[in-house]
Every structure is written in C-alpha cells, then in structure tokens.
Amino acid sequence: MNQMRKNGDLGSESFGACLLLSLPEDVIAVIARFVSPRDICNLSLCCKSLCEVFDSERIWLVQCEVVKVLSLSEMIQWRIGISSYKALCRFLGEVMKPLVGVWVHQNPELGNVVYVMPGFLSVVGCRIIPQEVGPLGIEEARVMWSPVFEIICGFDGSAKFFLHGRDGKLHFCLHPGFVMGIEKSCNVLLLEVETRREKELCSEIETVLLGETGVQLPFRKLPFSYRRNLLHIVTSTVGIPVPDLSSERLFPTSKDDEAVLLERRTMLLKMHKFGVDWNHMNLEDECINIPNQVDINESWKHLGFEVDNRNMDAGNQTQRKSFSRYFRSGIKHILGRSSSLKNTSSSRSETRPWNLQKFLNFGDSIGLSLKASNIKLSSYQGWPNMDETRYALYKLPNKNPIANEEYAGLWGGTFGWPPGKCTEDKPGKALFLLMLSYEESQDGTERLLIGTKILEGTHYAMHPNGSAMFVIKIDSPSFELFPFDTNGEDFEHSYAGEGTAKGYGFRYPGYKPGTLFVTSKGLLMFVWKATKVVLTLQRLDLGELLRKGVCVSPLLPCLNFAYLTKSHTNVFAPERRRS
C-alpha cells in the first residue's frame, strides 16, 4: 500500500489525479466533451498538474465545440481577437447560446422580427423589414434588415452592449450600455436603465435614504412614463455618432472581411471604454472619467424637477459631497409632501415621484442596460401573451425537426402558385414569415400543426400579428387534389385543416377549410378550399439571407428596440421598397 502511494505520489497531488494524468491527451480531450465548463474549472483547481492539462487551449477548444453555436473554422478565426479559448467559451456559453434565435414583439401588426445571430466576436440582433420579394424568389432576394443591438466580446470574454439607433437629426448612433445578466433559458429580452454608483457612498445616503435593507425598486415597477423618459434621457446622452451603417459590416460575408471587422471591433471596444472621447485614446490607456452614464442630478432636471444647488460650491465640492448635499437640500424640496398626506391616502400620481426616488436613490449615475430573463409566459397558438408597456422582445421557441414533428421551425414564402410568378402590374410579392409549431387540441384527442404569422410584407396589415395563418390536423390525411398544375412537383402528403379568413373584425379572424400539401422538394402549400388561394412556404436560413441582404437605417433607439405604438403600416421602412 505504501509502495502504491509512493509510486502514485507527485508532490502533493492525489493518487486519483495521477491516474487521470496518465491518460493520453486525446482521451482526456474526449472526456472533456462530457464535462461542463464549471467542472473543468474545478478540476484545474485541484493541483498544478491538472491545471496544466485542463486549463490548456485544446481542452477549452473542445468546450467551445460542445456549445455548438459556431463552426470550428469560425472559432479558430475568432481566437485571433481574444485572450484564450477559455474566454471564448465563456462568451459562447453565457451570451451567444442563450440569445441566438428569433425574437418578436406584438407591435406593429405587420410584424416585428429580430433575428439574433453570430457576428464577428459578437452577437448581432437584426430586424427583418416587412418587404416584397421579386420573381427570383426568397433565396435570391436581397432581404432588407436594420441593426437593433450588438454585444461585443471583450478580450477576456466579457460582454459589451451597444444599442443601435439614430438621433433627431437622422445621424446614426451607437448607445453603449451594460449586460446585466443573461439566463440560459431566457425568453424575454429587456431594455432598461440601470443605476450605477461609486464604491464610496456617504453613510447618510445609505442609511437614511436607502434604508436598512438597501433594496432597490426594480426598473420594471416604475410607471411607464418614467421608464420611457429615463430611457430617452440615457439614449440621447450616451449616443456616439458613427458612419452610415449601410457601408459597415456587422458580420463576415467573405474571407477578406477579417481585417475590417477586427478594426471595427477595436473601435467599439474603445467606444465602450472611453465614450465620445474614444477617437483620441488607445485601449491600453486608463479611463479617468466615467463614460456612457448620466449623472443623477441631470436626470432629475431632464425629468422636469428642479435641483436646489444654491448652497453648493461647484468648484470645490467633490462628487460625493455634492451628491449628499443634493439629497439633503434638493430631494426634500422636490419630493416633499405636506404632513397632511400622512393621514390621507395618496393618489397614484402623487406616489410616482416617490417610486422614482426609490429607484434613483440607489446610485449616482444611470446607464443603459440589457437583461435577458426567463419569466412565466402564457401563449395562444404558439404566440406569447406580451406586456405591451415594456421595451422587451420575446423569444419564440424554434424547435429543430424531429420524428413526428418534421415540419417544426421557421418557414417563409409568398401567396401564389407557382412560387415566384409575378405579373406586370405586381412585380413583387409580400414576404411572409411563419413559425410552425405542434400543439395538442383542447380536448387532447388530436395533434395540431400551427402556422403562426410573425412577418407580413404587405402595405397594410391584413392579418393580426401572431395569429395562426392555418391550423392543420396533422394526423388527418386529406384526399383533396391540388387544384392547379403541379409545375413538376411531386406531392408526398396532404393534411386537412383550416386557414385564416374574414371573421369578426381584424383582431378576431375566422377560419375556412383548406388542405396542406407537402412536396418531395420540401415545399409546403396551404390551399383554401373555397377560394383556391395558395400560400407557398419553404424553410429559411435567416443568417444566410441576412449576410446577402441590404442594411437600412434604424429608428430612434428606444423604438428601434421595441415599437410599442399600435400600427398597421410599415413603420420600419417608410418608403415601400422591393428586394
């Protein structure tokens, strides 16, 4: 026994570690595929020898492959701009994997679809503009899109958030902010304002104004008007003008783009670190001021509240002292209430400033933030029920096709047969995007295939956003014949169902009988029985379409993230354009 310990002893390392270290490097790499990144980190802390093995570039490259959001060639390409594969794995697992996918909002009715995809050492959120496609079809069209946000990967794998938008003079701007948390199973993406404070805050503020618990009022609990105003204050202050985005590259389209994208990433990292002074700084320089944030005092002024600074000596007071005196002399004057209010119930309007005070008291500056959370959402026919007073995007489950659910996923198409056929008076056709999902009927006796509309490229919305274009009884074959010439297509399956039709007003459409036809080439055609109207669909690779597409200008920053106003027109592309 003593001899075994002697042979297995490597300094202070355990005998079990020696057995693991005796394995070939290739075998250890295979084992690493079945171990989580957290377990890899724990193993590397056991001893020096295990640290050398499990903290190696090869092991962390394997972990990057396990995340399955980038190809091997892309990971090798990204490595040039980051400190290690371990840092890259952190960004891929904590930021990219939870966010990649299709995000939507209820407004406007034509559709609000944001596709989050890999950029270059970044994650990019791109909005698909409602539009028409020409006779060449979807795959050959140059789809119009506009940038919504970017999250840049720092050298250490940290996340740097930028909101895209334009200012009142129609100049393109980037608005730096903070990533405040991304849950792995997130389904809601929130644009909020975050309070920030220096390491030192006077005890008077912490004990008197924050209270003993020091619990901040969440941003979501502020009245909508204050949430909207705070977001507008921050975005109008921290915005940094940038060149016309139509000539910018947000993701690689060819092998020659690497140098340009690396230069752009360096520019964005400097913007995030130094703010508007980025052009005169190097990344290695120390940041003296606090950029990309708005002072609390300025926030109160922008909100329409005066601050009593008559007793302040601005030239001699430090930030901490001015902040303390502000709350002593200013807050009481701004938010003071007569003593009679203590004995009477306050109206909602009277309590709003107090709610705002409880939020802003927690820091000495505010900044833009992005938060990805998982909340319990109810849904109807594959469409989540949304809070239309929050600047939020909602993630649609995009399931990969599996046995018995082979039609699940994102589809796109146009009305008409054969697909792509146009006329002289209508040289383009409205692009429709549908998310197909499976559900059980209310009585649990049938499986349903639901085609939920998420984008409509018409001039004026004809179908409610998030409504079902068709509902198919996937276990009920149809014996209807395709009413037109097959155009060389071989039909493999057909299913009975119902398609949307005129009902009780726009919001409550009716449904008429129809048939879903499936071809051997993977096309889906839903045909309304009475009118013989055909909706032709095909699977889409949105990432590939966007790389070939055309970038158009975004809206004002907050509206560019989530358009909260009811509208039936194309607010994202004022002038009707065809791809």
Image: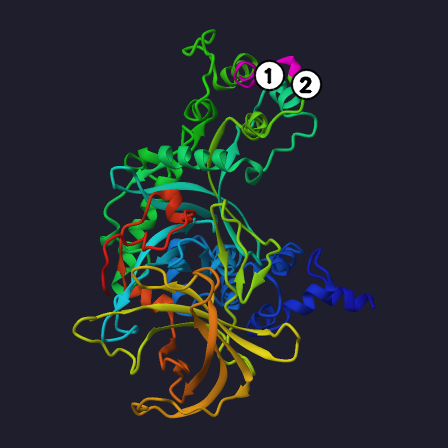
Disc nearer the start of the sequence (2/1)? 1
- Left or right: residue 54 versus residue 270 is right
What is the span of residues highlighted in magenta in the rendered image? 331-340
Spatial CA span between label 2 and label 1: 9 Å
Q: Secondary structure at mark 2?
A: helix
Q: Is residue 158 above or below residue 22?
A: above
- Identify which amino acid the numbered label 2 is placed on: Lys
Q: Residue furthest top?
A: 311
**Badge 2 is on which residue?**
342
Q: Residue furthest right?
A: 1
Q: Quadrant of the N terminus?
A: bottom right
Spot occupied by residue 570 in the image (x, y as percentages of width and height): 32, 55
Residue 294 in view, yes or no: yes
Most foreground residue, 558 or 527: 527
Spot occupied by residue 85 in the image (x, y as percentages of width and height): 48, 59
As for residue 271 lying within the magenta part, the answer is no
- Identify which amino acid the numbered label 1 is placed on: Arg
Looking at the magenta stretch, what is its main secondary structure? helix
- Classify mark 2: residues with Cα within 10 Å, few (<14), some (14-19) or many (20+): few
